[in-house]
Amino acid sequence: MITFELTKEQSLIQKTAKEFAAGEMRQIARDCDENDDIPPKVLNKAWEMGLANAAVPEAFGGIGMARSAMASALICEELGYGCASLATAIMAPSTFIHPLIDFGTEDQKQRYLPAYSGEKFAAAAAALHEPHFTFDVTDMRTVAQKSGDHWVLNGVKRLVPFAQKANHFLVLAKMGDQTGLAHVGAFIISKDAKGLTVDQEFEKTMGLKPLPKSKLTLTNVNVPDKDRLGESNSIDGRRLINTLRVANSAICVGLAKAVLDTSVPYSKQRVAFDAPIATRQAIAFMLSEMHSETEAMRWLVWKAASQLDQNSDATKAAALAQHYANKNTVIIADRGVQIFGGHGYIRDLPLEMWLRNARTLTVMEGVVAA
Amino acid sequence: MVDFTLNAKEQEVIREIRREGMVLREKYARYYDEHEKELPPDEFPEAKEFAHIDKMAADRGPDATTPTVFYLLMLMHRTWGDMMRLKVPVTALGNASVVAAGTDEQKKRWAKTRLSMANTEPGCGSDSKAIQTTAELDGNEWVLNGEKIFVTTGIRAEGCVVWATIDKSAGRGGIKAFVVMKGTPGFELVKKEEKMGIRSSDTAAFVLKNCRVPRENLLGMDDIVKKGGGGFKGLMKTFNLTRPGVAAMGIGNIMACQDFVAEAMAKEGITVDYEAGQHKRSAIQQKMIDLEAEMEAATLCTLRAAWLADQGKPNNLEASVSKQKGGDVSRRCAQLALEILGAMGITHDQLVEKWFRDARITDIYEGTGEIQRLVIARELLNYTAKELT
Ligand SMILES: Cc1cc2nc3c(=O)[nH]c(=O)nc-3n(C[C@H](O)[C@H](O)[C@H](O)COP(=O)(O)OP(=O)(O)OC[C@H]3O[C@@H](n4cnc5c(N)ncnc54)[C@H](O)[C@@H]3O)c2cc1C
C-alpha cells in the first residue's frame, strides 16, 4: 500500500529530533564552525536522548527502540536542519552501532554494544573513504586477505570521524580481489590494534569543519574472524552501504530545508529597488525550485529507507536518493548564498557555512550517519 | 508506516495496463500521430480484451492503496507509450470543472456527459482573469460572446464548460462557468489545431456568437452570482484536481522513454551500476541515473499530492509542486533519452521521437511551469496574486 504515513513512534522521534535541533544546535553552529570544535555537552545531550543509539537492544543496556532506517532518516533530516556538522558528529557513532545491530553476531553485539549504551557520548565510527579522488566503494584499495582463521588488512582510510577518540572502528574493506558491494567486508578494529595508526593531525576540510576527522593507516592489521562483522555469515555489503547512503542523503534534506526556511523570510524583508526582493520572479522562482527539490529529495530518501526497513534490495533507490540529494543540496545551498547577496558570503550569517557543508557532505559517500 | 509497494492485486492491475499499452501503442500510436485529422475511436477494439482491468482496479483487497494515489498511478501507466489510450472522459477537463464549481444537481445532471473546458483565449492563457468572453443574462438565458482556443477534446466532447465574465469591472469575481452543449446556435467550431505532439488528442478553437444557454447552465447556479466570487475559485479548484493528473500523464510518457532507453542500452551490453561511485560511470550511465532519479522525484511528488488529497488535507502547494516537477521532468528526461540514443532516437522507426514531441506539452497546459512556480512561491511567501505577479 502506497502511503506517506509515519508511525506514532516515528512521529515522536521526529518531533524529539526537531526540538533538539531547534533548542541545541542552531545557536552554537557558527561557533563550532569557527573553532573547529564541538562542546561535549551537545554530544552528550543528543546521546542521552538516544538519537544515535536508541536502537541498541535492552539486552545490551540500550533503549531498545526498533532499529529502523526510516527513523534514522527522520532524525538525520531534523539534525541536518539544525546543523549538518553537528548532525554528522552526533550521528557518527551510529555508523558503528547500527551496522552492528543490523549484521553483528550475538557474540559481537555482546562484546561491543554495551560500551555504546552508557550515559555519555562514546565515539566510534566507520572508516570508509580513501585518499584518492577516484575512490569507489565497490573497489576499495583497503584490502582484507584471509589467512587461516583471521584476516589481514592493509590500506589507508581518510576523513574518519572521531578517529582520535574512537574506541572502535568499523573498517570497510574489499574482501580479497572481488569487486562490488556484495564483497564489501566490515571489520571491527579497536583503537589499539597492532598495525593501526591513527594520524594525530586533524584533516582540515572546507565544510563540516567541527567534525574531527583523521586518517587511519592499516599495516598488516590482524583481525580474527570473530571480529569480522557477521563473522562466517557474510554480511550484505549492499545493505550496509545503502544504509549509509540513505542517512547521509537525509542530512542533505535537512540542510536544504534550512537554507529554504532562512531564505524565505529574508527575501520578504530585504528591499531593493523599492520592493522586497521576493516580489521579483528571479528570486521567487529560485525559492519555488528550492522547495520542490527539497520535497522530492525527502520522498526519494523515504522510499529508499522504507525499502531498507522492508528488507528489500534498496540499492537502486538508495543510489537515486543519493544522486538526487547530492546534486540538489549543493544547488540549493548555493542559491541560498545568492539570495542573501554579499551578506550570504559573510561569516556572520550561516549561508556560506551551509554551502561549504553541502559541498563537503555530498562527497563523503555516506560515511557520516547510519 | 511509510510504504511504496503495491499489493499483488495492484501489481497485476499495473501489469495488465502495461500489457494493454503495448498492444495499443504498437498498433495505433504512430498511426494517429501521422493521421492527425482522424479521431481515434472512443474505444479501441482491442480494449475489450482488457475490460477486466477496471473491475480488478475496483477490488484491490483490504490493504489497497488509497483511491487518488492509485488512480494517478494507473494514469501514469495508462499514458505509458501514448496518451491516446486514455478514454476521453478522463481528459475531459469540463467534468472536473463541474465537480469543482457545480451544484449537486448539476453534478448529477452532467455526470455522464463528456465536457471539454474552454478558458484560454487568443489574448490570454496563463492570465485567466483577463478573459474577454462575456455572458449577459437575458430573461432566462445567458448570452455568450467571445473566442476560445486550445480546447482539449473540443471536437469529441458533447459539450463544453466555457469560462466567461458577467462583469468585467469585477475582475476575477466576475468570471463564471457555463455549460454550452454542442449544437447550441452561435457555438461554432472554428478549427482543429495542428500540433507538435499529442496529435491523437483533439484540440479545438471555437467562437461564441450570441450563443444562448439556459440560465441553469451556469455552474453553481444563481447563487454564485448573488454571493459573488466563487466562480474563479472554482476554476482554480479545477486545476487543483487536475494538476497532479497532468503530471502523471507526463510521467507515464517518460516511463516509456526510460524503458525504451534501458532496453536499447541492454542490447548493447550497457548496464547501469547503481552500486559504484560516479567515477566508475560512463556519461551515458550517468545520464540514465539522472533520468531515473528525476522521474522518480516527479512520481513521488505526484503521489504525495494525491495522498494528501486522500487524507482530506489541503494540497494546493503539492499539486503545483507535482505539476512543476512533472513539466520539468517531461522536458528534461525526454531530452536525456534522445541524447543517449543519438540518431536512433530521432527516426520514425521508433516512438521515442514522438514521445519527445508529446512530452513537451506537459510544461505548458494546465498552468505553465512558470505559473506553477508562482503558485508555489506565493504559498511559501504567503503572498497574494497581487503581491507576486
Ligand atoms: C495542446 C493544448 C491543449 C490545451 N488544452 C486546453 C484546454 O482544454 N482548455 C483551456 O482552457 N486551455 C487549454 N490549453 C491552453 C493552455 O492552458 C495555455 O496555452 C497555457 O496556459 C499558456 O497560456 P498561453 O498559451 O496563453 O501563454 P501565455 O499566458 O501567453 O504565456 C506565454 C509565456 O509567458 C509565461 N508567463 C505568463 N505569465 C507569466 C507570469 N506572470 N510570470 C512569468 N511568466 C509568465 C508563460 O509561462 C509562458 O512561458 C491548451 C493548450 C495546448 C497547447
Image: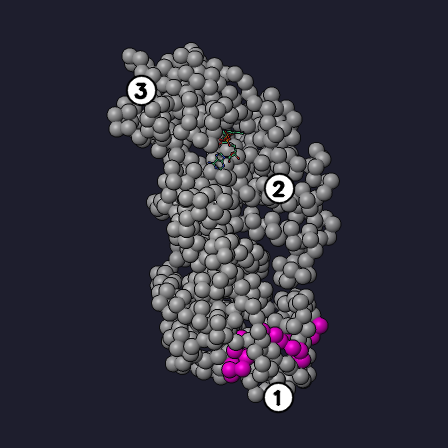
Q: Magenta stretch: residue A158 in it?
A: yes
What residue does disc 3 label? B216
Seen at 68% across and 44% down, the residue is B339
Q: Amino acid at mark 1?
A: Lys
Label 2 vs label 1: CA separation? 56 Å
Q: Magenta stretch: residue A333 in it?
A: no
Can you give x and y, in whole percent of width and height, for residue B221 in the image? 29, 24
Q: Amino acid at mark 2?
A: Ala
Give the structural element (helix, strand or loop) at label 1: loop
Q: Which residues are magenta?
A: A153-177
Nearer to the camera, B294 or B373:
B373
Label 1 crowd bin: few (<14), some (14–19), many (20+), radius 10 Å: some
Q: Which chain does the numbered disc 3 sit on? A: B
Nearer to the camera, A154 or A266:
A266
- Residue B6 in view in this figure: no
- Residue B172 in view in this figure: yes
| Mark 3 and mark 2 residues within 8 Å of each other at the beta carbon | no
Seen at 48% across and 65% down, the residue is A347
Label 2 crowd bin: few (<14), some (14–19), many (20+), radius 10 Å: many
What residue does disc 2 label? B334
Q: Is residue B174 above or below residue A172?
A: above
